[in-house]
Image (spheres, coloured by chain):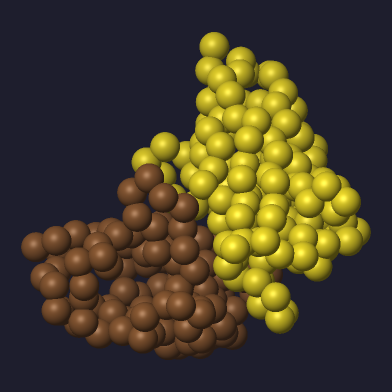
Amino acid sequence: EVQLVESGGDLVQPGGSLRLSCAASGFTFSSYNMNWVRQAPGRGLEWVSYISSSGTTIYYTDSVKGRFTISRDNAKNSLYLQMNSLKAEDTALYYCARTISGGSHALDYWGQGTLVTVSS
Amino acid sequence: AIRMTQSPSSFSASTGDRVTITCRASQGISSYLAWYQQKPGKAPELLIYAASTLQSGVPSRFSGSGSGTDFTLTISCLQSEDFATYYCQQYYTYPPTFGQGTKVEIK
């Protein structure tokens, strides 16, 4: 069974940092591209970042470029999101999501999310 | 970024109804479109990708169509478990973008 379990969310002050983790199991993690997607309270979905299976290709949404860093450790079956210079507008539930295999970039499995709250 | 606009934003329907949700892209995206279902307090679930391909395990009452800029998600016979919010997403180009969501409520 595919499982994605996020952790690391917390209450942090503006300007602070957090590192989110996503532990993957039930599939060959090193073969799949991965993503972070966020959802502000009561709002819709916003894609944040993508990393290819090997880690060589990375994309970010404009609002987090230069502040967030996505990475992965295929030996540990883990995905990460380092979040620096956090702003109130980064407050959201952050989901780890797997890109479906076969060339499509749809997201076929999602974790349950970890909550990041940026507030003083 | 490509803007995705869903309509309606919300509506009420009854069990057994046939319902259709529309998604329009601000530019052509071929068939690079997915639909997701999200229930309160839960993560989104993939329903359809490549505009019309049903994800494994998704009931056949769900179907998708369209290409270019206009797409639809149809639920042929609404069931109680289908009351949820639905999102379209384009993945034609980065950044992938979602529609604002369509909430299907019980009439």
Quadrant assignment, res A102: bottom right
Where, quadrant-wise, is the N terminus of chain B in this rendering? bottom right
Where residue A79 sits: x, y (%)? 75, 47
* Front residue (pair A85, A76): A76
Q: Is residue B57 visible?
A: yes
Where residue A59 sits: x, y (%)? 77, 55
Q: Colour of chain A?
A: yellow
Where residue B77 sits: x, y (%)? 21, 82
Where, quadrant-wise, is the C terminus of chain B in this rendering? bottom left
Residue at point 59%, 63% (across, down)? A1
Residue at point 45%, 73% (across, down)? B47
Left of B94 or right of it: where is A10? Answer: left
Residue at point 85%, 54% (across, down)? A74
* Front residue (pair A120, A36): A36
So how many labels did they put on this image?
0
Residue at point 65%, 31% (across, down)? A8
Left of A20 or right of it: where is B101? Answer: left
Q: Colour of chain B?
A: brown
Left of A82 or right of it: where is A91? Answer: left
Where residue A86 sits: x, y (%)? 66, 26
Q: Is residue A90 above or below residue B77?
A: above
